[in-house]
Image (cartoon, rainbow, N blue to C red):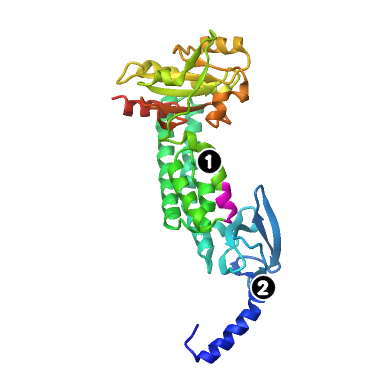
Amino acid sequence: MKPTLVAVALLGLVNACQNASAAEGYQINGQLRNVPAGTTLHLSELTSSQFVERGTAKTDAQGRFTFKGTLPVTAAVYQLKLDEPNQVLLVLDNKTHLSLAGDAKSLPASYSVKGSKDSEIIQQLTRTMSANKDKLQRIVQRYNAAGQAGRTDSLPIIEQQYTVLQRATAARARRVIRQNAASVAAGFATLSFVNPDEDFAFADSIAGIQRKANPGSPFTQALTERLEPMRATAVGATAPEINLAQPDGKALSLKSLRGKYVLVDFWASWCGPCRQENPNVVKAYNEYKDKGQGFTVFSVSLDDDKDRWTKAIAADGLVWPNHVSDLKKWNNAAAAAYGVQAIPQSFLLDPQGKIIAKNLRGQALEAKLAEVLK
């Protein structure tokens, strides 16, 4: 408020109070290049399962358009869409008045937004995550080409290049989120861009900040609900106990293997990807079982047929002695305790029974074992 007489200020305050409800509402003023007059833009709210359209606007001869109205009380993420390739995300509430500009032919790469800090954060994160998109796609193409040509020796190297670039991109996104941890955008971004399997501690710390800063946000609730079941099997946690029957009917406890590094491996005879991964686990077991403090595998089968289970053990050469199952398929008690919803899934434990890594496959598993079993 500009300095003025007290009486005038008080009169202005009375008027503002009387008209506050009428002044509430969002507004987007935009202007696009390379767009015909009369082009329709769509504004849709991101709900729990899909985008729901909340309004449309048309461009004028100069490419200008306006959206305005009232929204639900809680800030939410909205999609401003011209067509499938040209759409951006915004954070809106009833106090948002923002301006947007960009090229209609390359909106995600060209747009700029002012007047909404949360929307500016989303823009920064989107560009951060897409910066290496083309490079990652080229690495995938090289990987597929090498596989089709039978150059299997180069696959681990290409896979490692992909992992390094992907992790660097994720690290940049985490920095942006951390710098704006109390924003609504950070809650949405943590849900969208952070893999809690790989970085539970980071996601959990942002969730804690969000619960204080934005307790009513749907992203705070969704993030909390997503993380809570993972807490028991987060990296750094003591692995939940497993005590199930072996093929001979005798019970085997996971705790009985303390003192060694243990890969808790969830699989099944009917799971194609599991059977494809088994040779990598066998290779790692044979190479590292006698190194350092020792390494073994604790295989938990989600089979419901004992004969198929035991035949698969023999066929795949799973020579370690630690095989358990309750033959209840997806109702397996250990799978429930570990939050397993897809297989193969694995957890690497240190000799004290703490989880030190998750879902390591192929070269990644061998690299981790080489690191800890020196």
Quadrant of res 58: bottom right
Q: Which mark is residue 35?
A: none
Look at 52% across and 42% down and name the residue there.
227
Give the percent coordinates (x, y) of residue 64.
63, 71
Give the percent coordinates (x, y) of residue 262.
41, 22
| Residue 54 as seen in the image, left or right of residue 335 | right
Quadrant of res 69: bottom right
Which residue position is annotated with label 2?
A: 61
Look at 59% across and 23% down and name the residue there.
332
* Tag 2: amino acid: Ala
Viewer can see residue 230: yes
- Assign the C terminus to one quadrant of the image: top left
Q: Point out the frontmost of discs 1 and 2.
A: 1
* Tag 1: amino acid: Glu
Answer few, some or many: residues within 10 Å of disc 2's Cα (few below 14, many 20 plus, some between 14 and 19): few
Give the residues drawn in magenta, as a range. Answer: 216-222
Which residue position is annotated with label 1?
A: 228
Q: Residue furthest top?
A: 248
Assign the magenta stretch its main secondary structure. Answer: helix
Q: Is residue 221 magenta?
A: yes
Q: In this rendering, is residue 65 above or below 239?
A: below
Give the percent coordinates (x, y) of residue 88.
58, 57
For mark 1, give the secondary structure.
helix
Q: In this rendering, is residue 82 above or below 31?
A: above
Answer few, some or many: residues within 10 Å of disc 1's Cα (few below 14, many 20 plus, some between 14 and 19): few
Look at 32% across and 28% down and name the residue there.
372
Which is more toward the observer, 35 or 68? 68
Q: In this rendering, is residue 98 above or below 252?
A: below
Look at 41% across and 52% down and name the residue there.
175
Which is more toward the observer, 148 or 248? 248
Which is more toward the observer, 176 or 11? 11
